[in-house]
Image: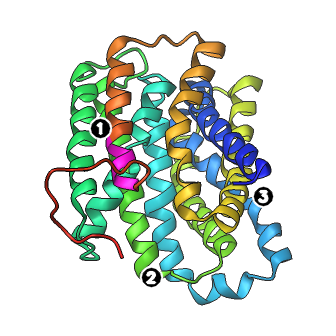
Amino acid sequence: MKPRDTIELLLLAAIWGASFLFLRMGAAEFGPFALAGLRVLGASLFLLPLLWRRGEWAALRQHWRAIAVVGIINSAIPFLCFSYAALAITGGLSSIFNATTPLWGVVFAWWWLKDRPNAHKLVGLAIGFAGVLWLAWDKASFKPDASGASSGLAVLACLTATTMYGLAASMTKRWLTGVPAMALATGSQLSAAIVLLPLMLWHWPATMPGTTAWGAVAALALVCTGVAYVLFFRLIANIGAGNALSVTFLIPGFAIAWGGLFLGEAVNATMIGACAVVLIGTSLVTGVWKPALPLKFGREPS
């Protein structure tokens, strides 16, 4: 990668890591539905002019049905789940569960697209999900706190979100290969906004949130979603999808750092250990690390 690409990759990791901080800052006052709804609505308003400027509106009209489904699976549901999780667990913890997205991607590609994983991916799946079970077991309390949420349900919400991300990856590959990235990004946010808008209005907070919460929503929508999409797709174009996805490994570090710096969120030994296990599994699944294995089975990549 060129120095500029490396800087943009680190910037993207910092931005997406900060999204978990902003979720924590806005969730209590807005609630999950309003927070997720405002996030996708703001991102849609940010991306629509860029789509028009790039002349990709026709692609969105042509593929709007498939893009709408992907938007619900890849944005509406996950953003709502992570907004709920922010009520009960730290941003750093949510970001570690978020790092399991490539694991679910391999599972759905295997099940739906018949893309049989090779030995490294199978070992990576086993290791990665072992880390998830370790971390989830440590937080398996379903007793509601003052916000009405529980850490156990928050963990399930995070895993639901990452499962949706994995499913959306296979949907995109099956239905939307070759569709311009900006049309896909804008259309997915727009469809998510349409779905979440009535829920957002129905669950609008009785007390108007403060300026800090509003600032967190603006940062989530414009920076962590709008600007982040532009950066991500530019990285894919410049360094390839595989290298761009290495941002997955950097996000937890930034999320834990932002949470500790601005919210005083603590990190315990279980979080560090489970995070390491999850990232080892993810590195095998994504092909970042390819150690010699005693057994070879499955279909090797061409």
Q: Looking at numbered disc 2 in the image, what kind of residue is underneath it?
A: Trp
Q: Secondary structure at mark 1?
A: helix
Q: Secondary structure at mark 3?
A: helix
What residue appears at the point 46 percent right and 73 percent down from the top-left corner? 172
Mark 3 nearby-residue class (10 Å; few <14, some 14–19, many ≥20): some
User: Which residue in the structure is indicated by mark 3?
Assistant: 46
Residue range of the region highlighted in magenta in the rendering: 281-286
Q: Nearer the viewer, residue 135 or 30?
A: 135
Which residue is disc 1 drawn over? 156
Q: Are marks 1 and 2 in contact (CB under 8 Å)?
A: no
Quadrant location, the C terminus: bottom left
Q: CA distance from mark 3 to mark 1?
A: 31 Å
SS for dot 2? helix
Residue 21 can be seen, yes or no: yes
Q: Which mark is residue 37?
A: none
Q: Position of residue 216 (x, y in %)?
A: 69, 32
Residue 271 is situated, as x and y percent measured from the top left of the image, at 37, 20
Taking 131 as reference, is 53 above or below it?
Answer: below
Q: Amino acid at mark 3?
A: Phe
Distance from the alpha carbon under mark 2 to that under mark 3:
25 Å
Which residue position holds label 2? 175
Q: State the residue in front, 33 or 77.
A: 77
Amino acid type shown at disc 1: Leu
